[in-house]
Amino acid sequence: MNIPLSRFWAELATVLPDIASARFVAFDFEMTGIEPRNAPPLQRPTKEQLYERARQATEMFNVLQFGLTCISYKAAAADAKERDGKNGTFHLKSYNFNVSPMFDTHASAGAVLARVLDRTLTLSYKTLMFLSKNRIRIEDAYDGGIPYLSRTEEWQAVDEMFGTNQRPETQLVDIDKTQEETKQFYVEVADNIRKWESDKSSDSYLNIRNPHNGPMTRFQRRLVYQILEIEFKRKYRAVVKENYFMQITKRDGEVEEKGLTQVPFVKLAGEPFADDVYQLYDLNGGIVDTFIRDKLKSSEAKLQTERPILVGHNMFLDLCFLYATFFAPLPDTLDSFGQAIHKVFPRILDTKHILTYADHEMMAPKILDDMFLELEKKDAPFAIEHSQTRAAHKTPLVNAHQAGHDSYKTSVVFLHEMWKHVGMDDFCPLEKENGDSDTPMVWESPSTQQFANKIRIGNAGIWNLGADDTLPNDGAGHNEETV
């Protein structure tokens, strides 16, 4: 299911509970490029060299799409097993999101973000040809894509937008040493805020303008932020409107701008979201559902205690872009990045590693599309049902490399391959007599741990994400493809 910006908040109220109820979540990214320009070829590269190449790519290129497939399991009763020959059913729900690096400059927050962050937009010509061949339109991301902020970008912008960062004393303006016009401006603004604060019949906002006409200067904005911080103990916020005046409001209105960061991957990492998502769901005309807030609260609590297992295919670059896009710039070293991503996503499985676990260098590469076509026809001790019934958008998942569809293919390959290593009874347990069932695939079991948090990095070998150091090249150094 493709989710456009116009339906983002309404559908997010469904997507987040789907994530919370999933045992596994498969993901995939499409980027504007993956190889820095004029990068020299690497002969027998190390993991650290490939990481540095990936880090440069995240600084140069942007995410166009990300896709999610939520995988949940329903165990079958013993009589159903005898009838159908299946232990249970894995239910898959796929979502595709076009991601925009643009800000809505018609809104005051967007205009400030565009000026403060000033993102660089770069497109690789090779990537453009690939996207065009697979009918993925870049225009869908830049025009109507879902905007985002990483955590670091939010911290960078928040002081400019809200004046929320407390400044050291050395950065405060000494009003006593300023000109008379400055002192008068400071006193009048503070008095006007006090009058607005005490007048119960006043509007919910107060506009501050330049008393000498024209747009407010940077110095005047700085003084307003200082007034709110020093005189009013940060009870209110100030937002620059249309680059011309400032608007003072209470802090309970911050959810509109915070919404720029409320994307599923950040929530998958266990951050609070229920109140913000429900508020924006309601503001954006979501269908009235008396249980929606409770569903969101329940989902939030579950994700904070146990997150789904994150699944990807050949996912090293995807992990790099995931972290750089929604969290922070990549750290300087692979070890530091491993610690950072493991803290956010403590349970990860790479289907590329699962597929090539017993391979040697003479074996042909295993490409996702080929493996999907081969495995989806094979019998398994479980059924797979793929749901796309909620037609939030008319665009079907037909593009071969649309991120949502790739996450679905990754899910199918993962299910068909992983159960062979884990075992039928562990991977897809039957329903018990009391109606309960065990959790599919116990993470701590030895059969799972041989793949747990181990990521293939091209021909350089396996990166052991959950350990202090990485595994050496395991000998499976065959011709590595990127898909």
Image (cartoon, rainbow, N blue to C red):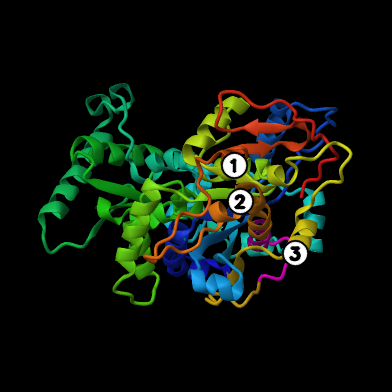
Q: Position of residue 451 (x, y in %)?
A: 62, 40
Q: Amino acid at mark 2?
A: Gly
* Range covered by the magenta-colored residues: 397-410
Determine which quarter of the picture holds residue 68: bottom right
Which of pointers 3 and 1 lies earlier in the amino acid sequence? 3
Which of pointers 2 and 1 lies earlier in the amino acid sequence? 2
Which disc, if any, is residue 400? 3
> For this rendering, which residue is in front, 155 or 386?
386
Q: Position of residue 169 (x, y in %)?
A: 28, 23
Residue under the image location 69 percent in, 56 percent down: 413
Helix, strand or loop status at disc 3: loop
Circles 2 and 1 in contact, beta carbons < 8 Å: yes
Helix, strand or loop status at disc 2: loop
In the picture of the structure, the residue carrying the numbered disc 2 is: 423
Residue under the image location 37 percent in, 37 percent down: 219
Helix, strand or loop status at disc 1: helix
Cα distance between the residues tagged 2 and 3 = 31 Å
Cα distance between the residues tagged 2 and 1 = 8 Å
Q: Quadrant of the N terminus?
A: bottom right
In the picture of the structure, the residue carrying the numbered disc 1 is: 447
Cα distance between the residues tagged 3 and 1 = 32 Å
Determine which quarter of the picture holds residue 472: top right
Task: Tell me the crowding category of disc 2: few under 14, some 14 to 19, or many 20 or more residues within 10 angstroms, Cα based.
Answer: some
User: Would residue 184 be found to the left or right of residue 219 on screen?
Assistant: left
> For this rendering, which residue is in front, 281 or 397?
397
User: Would residue 232 be found to the left or right of residue 226 on screen?
Assistant: left
